[in-house]
Image (spheres, rainbow, N blue to C red):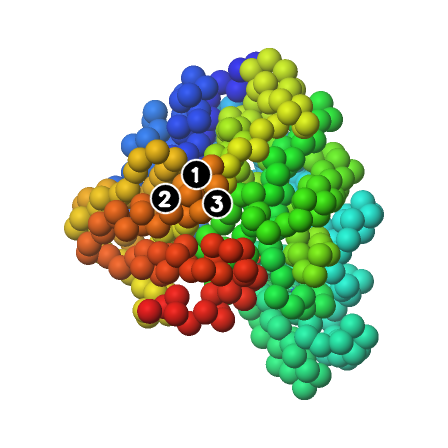
Amino acid sequence: MENIKKILVANRGEIAIRIFRACTELNIPTVGIYSTEDSGSFHRYKADESYLVGEGKKPIDAYLDIEGIIALAKDSGANAVHPGYGFLAENVDFARRLEEEGILFIGPTSKHLDMFGDKVKAREQAIKAEIPVIPGSDGPVTTVEEIAKFGESVSYPIIIKASLGGGGRGMRIVNSPDEVMEAYERARSEAKSAFGSDEVYVEKYINKPKHIEVQILGDTHGNVIHLYERDCSIQRRHQKVVEIAPSISLEEGLREQICDAAVKIMKKVGYINAGTVEFLVSDGRFYFIEVNPRIQVEHTITEMVTGIDIVHAQIHIADGQNLHKSEASIPSQDKIPLFGYAIQSRVTTEDPLNDFMPDTGKLMVYRSGGGFGVRLDAGNGFQGAVITPYYDSLLVKVSTWGMTFREAAAKMDRNLQEFRIRGIKTNIPFLENVVKHNNFLTGNYNTGFIDSTPELFL
Ligand code: ADP
């Protein structure tokens, strides 16, 4: 490394461990942080040194303690911070404060976080880059009349979305003019409580689309490349459950157009580090929805099909290196491999038979699958671990690879069957039903798959 000496990971769970592992492989010492509630969490022990943060604060707020985290970075001699996903990963103030302190942020610039943290601003960038967007309002909407007028002009259904939304929250589908008022109020209040702003905008609701997203890497030397697409259409309440790379149902021409569009917008804004451009695809057409300016949960499957370690790349980029030279040595765009298929399942501590209610307590038994073509990214995945109610319910990400999609799916099914987890309920039976389903195996699905397939819940 030229500049990075030591990395603090401002996160917890599986993503913190994923990043520590990458740092160790690159011979970079690591600093971890943990909340009081996470005193026994595995990520704490995976760092070379780790420190309690946010004492006396609420469990979530500990990992949002900007000044506490900066002080720990300085005290421990960490000159770079990786934010993972969630928590401070897209926090403009955090990135700015680190910039002020001369600590490297392993992610995009605060300018890009600002641009893409707001879906209305992101949409403006997409329009400027001349890539297709969903018919929508010109900026935020503030009255019921405005929304009703829009609904009339594009025809219902439409969708009201929080400008600062994320995680599938702050969205309301509106099927007819008489639903506008209530949906608007609900979307606003949900947006206000979840994101601190009640600003919303409207888009045409695309009927039964696929969610296709493109992994991007940009460096400080002007290189912007894509690592192909992921299909994240298997969603529940607009949140991803199972992801696939590459998509099994995009015509070849369309894939190229989508990947080109993703590179186009990111080049236009001079994007730096890892990011994802998300699209909806319907009837052979694609539409930009948003950019996620961070590493994503589902990055694992892109790594499996391209062989490129995205976290290594993030660190090299933040260190100021050229993507295609020296240590980073990522092949040029036309030589990026795409080999086989990968699937990721998000195993959560949720009960599929009880509306996915999170379960908590002690893992009495924990045995995972394994074997050729299997990758496990776990947080507290061990016997005796205590699952608390304070953080998200992701237990382990199971990713499988196969030369064909069927092979990757068969490995996923076999792996999910091999898991033995007792003491806590998980969504594994549900995931097994998904990856065995004929419509899943044939690519005959869209974002409505889970909602419209009751047999998945048996
Ligand atoms: P978030 O940032 O909360 O993840 P996104 O804008 O990425 O929100 O949308 C998440 C999901 O919501 C999409 O994958 C899709 O299933 C659904 N969605 C969002 N916008 C639309 C739309 N205009 N039409 C149909 N579905 C949509």
Q: Camera-side residue: 4 or 376? A: 376
**Foreground mark, 3 or 1?**
3
Say if disc 2 is inside 8 Å of ligand 1.
no
Report the residue marked by disc 3: 405
The kind of residue tagged 3 is: Phe
Q: Which amino acid does label 1 sit on?
A: Trp
What amino acid does circle 2 point to? Lys
- The residue at 78%/49% (across/down) is 131
List x then y, in percent, for residue 52. 34, 38
Q: Do the residues labelled 3 and 2 touch (CB within 8 Å)?
A: no
| Disc 2/disc 1 C-alpha distance (Å) | 8 Å
What residue appears at the point 31 percent right and 45 percent down from the top-left corner?
415
Q: Which of marks 2 and 1 is nearer the N terminus?
A: 1
Q: Mark 2: give few (<14), some (14-19) or many (20+) Cα within 10 Å.
A: many
Instruction: Please give the label number shown on residue 411.
Output: 2
Quarter placement of the C terminus = bottom left
Q: Which residue is drawn at 28% across and 42% down?
A: 369
- Label 1: which residue? 401
